[in-house]
Image: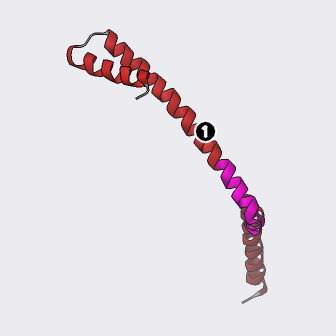
């Protein structure tokens, strides 16, 4: 191998190493390793995330349920022959909280 090829190979390797260092920094690998070294902090973060998801699901389901009930009441007001009685029974059950 001549000197030109070696210099080009070294330059290419340096570029690859620099690119790899930038990608590792973007992944925030150091912060992840620090988090794994502190399991109680990891549990705390996951607990807070779980509580947040649970509250979000509860609020979303409540809003969706209210919209569905509003739509069902509207269908009852249309006085459809077969569907009206069934929907009226469902709405009455929900209002009685059975």
Give the quadrant of residue 83. Answer: top left
76 to 13, vertically: above or below? above
The magenta segment: 32-49
Residue at the image position 48 percent from the left and 23 percent from the top = 66
Q: Secondary structure at mark 1?
A: helix
Q: Disc count in the image?
A: 1
The percent position of residue 97, horizontal first and vertical second, equals 44, 26
Give coordinates of residue 87: x percent, y percent: 31, 21
Relative horizontal placement of residue 44, taking residue 79 as reference (left or right): right
Name the quarter where the N terminus is drawn.
Answer: bottom right
Q: Residue furthest left?
A: 81
- Residue extending furthest toward the bottom: 1
Which residue is disc 1 drawn over?
55
In magenta segment, residue 43? yes
Q: Residues within 10 Å of mark 1 (few under 14, many from 20)?
A: few
- Residue 1 drawn above or below residue 82: below
Q: Position of residue 48 (x, y in %)?
A: 69, 48
Q: Main secondary structure of the magenta part?
A: helix
Colouring scheme applied when the structure was drawn: secondary structure
User: Can the viewer see residue 29?
Assistant: no
Q: Which residue occupies 27% across, 22% down?
A: 86
Q: Nearer the viewer, residue 4 or 46?
A: 46
Residue 64, image x, y percentages: 48, 28
For the question of whether residue 8 can be seen, the reply is yes
């Amino acid at each position: 191998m001549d000197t030109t090829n070696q210099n080009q190979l070294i330059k290419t390797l340096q570029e690859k190493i620099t690119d790899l260092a930038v990608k590792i920094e973007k992944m925030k690998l150091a912060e992840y390793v620090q988090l794994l070294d502190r399991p109680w902090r990891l549990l705390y973060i996951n607990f807070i995330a779980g509580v947040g998801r649970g509250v979000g699901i509860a609020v979303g389901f409540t809003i969706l349920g209210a919209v569905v009930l509003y739509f069902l009441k509207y269908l009852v007001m249309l006085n459809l022959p077969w569907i009206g009685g069934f929907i009226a029974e469902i709405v009455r059950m929900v209002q009685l909280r059975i």
